[in-house]
Amino acid sequence: MTALALSSLSREELRRWLEERGHPAYRADQIRRHMLRAGEGGFASMSDLPLQLRTELEESAVWSSLEVLAETAADRGLTQKLLLRTEAGHELEAVMITHPARDGSRGRRTVCVSSQAGCAIGCVFCATGRLGLRANLTAAEIVDQVLEAARRWDAESLGRPTNVVLMGMGEPLQNYRQVVLAIHLLHGWGIYPRQVVLSTSGLVPEILRLAEEGLGVRLAISLHATHDELRDRLVPINRRFPIASLLDAAREYAAASGRRVTLEYVLIKGVNDDPGAARRLGQMAASIRGHVNLIPMNAIPGSDLRAPSPAACRDFAALVGPRATIRHSRGDRATAACGQLRASLTPEPRREGRILARELALVGSPSGPPA
Ligand code: SF4
């Protein structure tokens, strides 16, 4: 029988779980405080709980649904990547990004979490896509990535996580139910939906479902191309949900949530970085009253695709217009930047051949729209 992951329960559910076993409900808050605290080693070390409760917890629940396999750091320790394993043996990664307080601004602590182990979408520029889908993560496994990060920041007395971005491994909207449950659970840990960014490759029906859900998370769409012929190859889900339908869904989401939608655009030299693409991207952003994040591509092993030069990125951004910001992914030296997460202890590149073949078809491809 699989043990209960405490992170799968809301505060109220944990209170009820304790009461059903004859323990006072207030113990729930004690347990949850431990779950956020640095240096905790599991139920045995919760010395303010009665021995009987600790024993019961040991027997029927797990401290965390994830095991930490490795940790790496970059940017002088401001970016940390955690390699984690689920009870079922699936590996995944989470990234902690610390933005120190500066010039009167308060510091931020962002956790980039995975929603799946691997990913089925197969975007050409993405290391995770090369793994294929191994498993959907449970809500507890998503929440535990944030709690792992919280304990590490607590160890440095930096405070709680301030933002969660669903931009790690996986397409969050292909794991819709568990992702939405995780967002509800995170609220109970003090992370409001407006502090959560959900990044999708463009599953139109689920974007509309999310709009109806009324959660109020911020939505980012991985666009990466301004015409269908190219996007079909870069982001294969585009063959089912072309750009026009995606922009319609973005408008609906913005109207329903009252939040500006972000278009993410990985800049790939010679593929999607021509002046025409920049102008079309600016028009698309204006049409949804959204914003554009331009992300110079991070090199991934086994791929020739590269970012344009910094000057070319700046020229592209100027043509997109005032709605564009160039974002440099933090942590690329720890292979922790966007599109580079790939649980790396036991890589299984079973889809590599197919994706590399598609990638080769991009070389020399015209990046303007088909005539
Ligand atoms: S970019 Fe996102 S959706 Fe595309 S393959 Fe990578 S993880 Fe999946």
Image: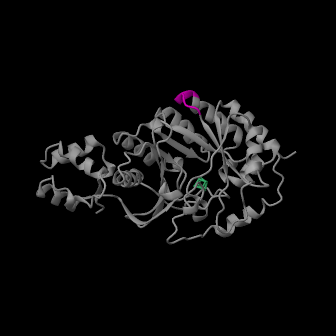
Q: Position of residue 213 (x, y in %)?
A: 47, 34
Q: Nearer the viewer, residue 55 or 213?
A: 55
Up the image or down, 219 lies above or below 7; here it is: above
Q: Residue at x 17, y 42 (%)?
A: 25
Residue 8 falls left or right of residue 325:
left
Residue 317 falls left or right of residue 195:
right
Q: Position of residue 298 (x, y in %)?
A: 65, 58
Q: Residue at x 67, y 58 (%)?
A: 125
Quadrant (top left, top right, bottom left, bottom right) of the N terminus: bottom left
Q: Nearer the viewer, residue 305 or 346?
A: 305
Residue furthest front in the image:
103
Up the image or down, 84 lies above or below 246; here it is: below
Looking at the rendered structure, the number of numbered marks drawn on it comes to 0
Question: Does residue 226 appear anywhere in the picture?
Answer: no
Quadrant (top left, top right, bottom left, bottom right) of the C terminus: top right
Q: Position of residue 263 (x, y in %)?
A: 64, 41
Residue 17 falls left or right of residue 151:
left
| In magenta segment, residue 258 | yes
Question: Does residue 185 appear anywhere in the picture?
Answer: yes
Up the image or down, 157 lies above or below 251; here it is: below
| In magenta segment, residue 190 | no
Q: Nearer the viewer, residue 44 or 80?
A: 80
The quadrant where ligand 1 appears is bottom right
Up the image or down, 99 lies above or below 279; here it is: below
Would you identify the image quadrant in which residue 332 lies?
Answer: bottom right
Q: Position of residue 337 (x, y in %)?
A: 57, 56
Would you identify the image quadrant in which residue 349 lies?
Answer: bottom right
Q: Residue at x 83, y 47 (%)?
A: 368
Q: Residue at x 70, y 54 (%)?
A: 234
Residue 180 falls left or right of residue 278:
left
Q: Nearer the viewer, residue 274 or 157?
A: 157
The boundaries of the magenta stretch are 255-260
